[in-house]
Image (cartoon, helix red, strand yellow):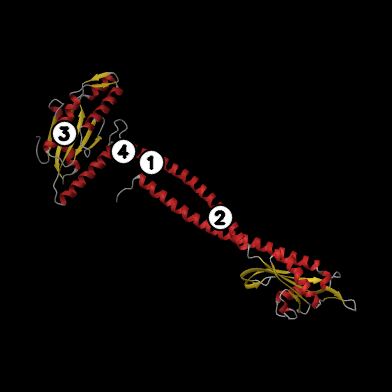
């Protein structure tokens, strides 16, 4: 399974965070919008219902003398003479039209209509109206209802109207209940106010969410990048040799093993390749440390690593194998190829003096090379290279020796 790079992990995590933010923001804003719409509706409806009750009470009080009359026995009753109906119609029309009142009815205690802005209703009974019954029992009843059609005081027809229907009891000064007053107030215009209020609040909330999410996203992204950089630094430290900047032994051996496995798969697929493995050792390195100190010795190791790296192909694998030892794997190479590369490395080190901390040094290396087939084991290739390295040192150092698989030194 391919190991995901840190950048890919970060990108996936950021995409996941964005998706989660969008889903959560959409859900929160949708639910909040629905809640705000209900809250606005409830508040506006409650205000409209209270306003309707106040208007009804004011109308009854204002027209008290026109509505209440005294019988011969002294009892007060609601009584409206026919000649007064037109006068009331005109009065109500002038007073109530600006307030969006569309209908007024006045009832006697037996549910009979004694006055209505709709004249055909006068004289009719409304015994089945439960809300009217509550008003005739002394209760105030005001609720919003949707009407398919309503005629206003000017006899104009309106469709799909929201109406606050209010019933209040009519009482004389002694407290006796003598009838009920019904009032229809058109509150359809509040629909737009409700929607606009909810929309403005929703836009404000969305802006706040957008700012918060963008701010949080920026902080999280910054934190993730810092974490990714820290992880990358740790990864580099785990695979890079601290002194030379090339692969350390652990990462070196891991990559070399992968290359051996790849070559084996190529052979199974019908492509036979050979691999060259070189072990390089700085000659008489202990004398450098003893004569110039370990800082100069470390500088020499760094310079050797740089010069080796400059002579390799991009896909050759170089790492620090030990203290002053290096290992190189030459994938898909030949005898001439690996020997030519080794000679370039040997000569670029031996032919140009080192200048380390003001000290000039003559440095040479010995190189042992093994050339193996794709089915060879890594341990076998290393063992052959070790033998070749010992042979190079025994021949006076600053030499290159090669051993092939199942063959002696070349």
Question: Whole-Å distance between the Cαs marked 4 and 1?
Answer: 12 Å
Residue 1 located left or right of residue 46: left
Lower position in the chain sequence, tag 2 or tag 4? 2
Q: Which residue is mark 2?
A: 202
Residue located at (53% from left, 50% from top) = 207
Asked if residue 260 is positioned above or below residue 356 in the image, the reply reads: below
Question: Whole-Å distance between the Cαs marked 3 and 4?
Answer: 25 Å
The residue carrying pointer 3 sits among few (fewer than 14), some (14 to 19) or many (20 or more) residues within 10 Å by Cα, namely: some
What label does residue 239 carry, if any?
4
Q: Which residue is mark 3?
A: 341
Residue located at (36% from left, 44% from top) = 7
Question: Whole-Å distance between the Cαs marked 2 and 4?
Answer: 53 Å
Lower position in the chain sequence, tag 2 or tag 1? 2
Indicate the secondary structure of the residue bearing disc 1. Answer: helix
Question: Whole-Å distance between the Cαs marked 1 and 3?
Answer: 35 Å
Q: Please tell me whether mark 4 or mark 1 is closer to you in this view.
A: 1
The residue carrying pointer 4 sits among few (fewer than 14), some (14 to 19) or many (20 or more) residues within 10 Å by Cα, namely: some
Residue located at (75% from left, 70% from top) = 90
For this rendering, which residue is in front, 155 or 276?
155
The location of residue 118, given as percent across then percent down, is 71, 75
Lower position in the chain sequence, tag 4 or tag 1? 1
Question: Whole-Å distance between the Cαs marked 2 and 3?
Answer: 71 Å
């Amino acid at each position: 399974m391919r190991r995901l790079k840190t950048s890919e992990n970060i990108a996936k995590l950021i995409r996941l965070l964005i998706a989660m933010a969008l889903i959560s923001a959409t859900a929160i804003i949708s639910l909040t919008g629905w809640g705000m719409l209900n809250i606005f509706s409830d508040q506006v409806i409650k205000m409209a219902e209270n306003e309707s009750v106040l208007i009804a009470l004011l109308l009854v009080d204002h027209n008290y003398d026109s509505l209440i009359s005294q019988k011969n026995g002294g009892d007060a009753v609601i009584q409206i003479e026919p000649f007064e109906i037109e006068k009331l119609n005109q009065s109500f029309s002038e007073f109530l039209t600006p307030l969006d009142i569309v209908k007024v009815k006045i009832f006697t205690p037996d549910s009979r209509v004694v006055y209505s802005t709709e004249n055909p209703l006068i004289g009719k009974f409304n015994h089945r109206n439960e809300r009217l019954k509550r008003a005739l029992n002394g209760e105030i009843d005001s609720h919003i209802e949707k009407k398919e059609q309503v005629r206003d005081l000017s006899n104009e027809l309106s469709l799909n109207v929201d109406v606050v229907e209010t019933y209040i009891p009519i009482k004389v000064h002694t407290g006796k209940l003598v009838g009920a007053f019904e009032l229809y107030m058109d509150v359809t215009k509040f629909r737009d106010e409700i929607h606009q209020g909810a929309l403005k609040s929703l836009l404000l909330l969305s802006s706040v969410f957008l700012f918060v999410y963008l701010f949080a996203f920026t902080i999280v992204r910054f934190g993730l990048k810092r974490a990714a950089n820290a992880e990358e630094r740790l990864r580099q430290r785990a695979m890079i040799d601290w002194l030379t900047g090339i692969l350390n032994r652990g990462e070196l051996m891991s990559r070399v093993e992968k290359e051996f496995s790849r070559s084996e798969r190529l052979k199974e697929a019908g492509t036979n390749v050979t691999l060259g493995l070189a072990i390089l050792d700085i000659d008489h390195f202990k004398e450098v440390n003893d004569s110039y100190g370990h800082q100069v010795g470390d500088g020499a190791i760094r310079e050797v690593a740089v010069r080796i790296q400059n002579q390799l192909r991009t896909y050759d694998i170089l790492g620090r194998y030990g203290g002053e030892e290096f290992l190189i794997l030459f994938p898909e190479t030949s005898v001439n190829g690996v020997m030519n590369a080794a000679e370039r490395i040997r000569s670029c080190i031996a032919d140009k003096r080192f200048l380390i901390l003001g000290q000039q040094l003559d440095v040479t290396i010995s190189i042992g090379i093994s050339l193996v087939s794709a089915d060879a084991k890594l341990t076998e290739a290393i063992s052959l290279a070790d033998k070749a390295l010992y042979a190079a040192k025994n021949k006076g150092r600053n030499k290159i020796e090669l051993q092939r698989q199942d063959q002696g030194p070349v």
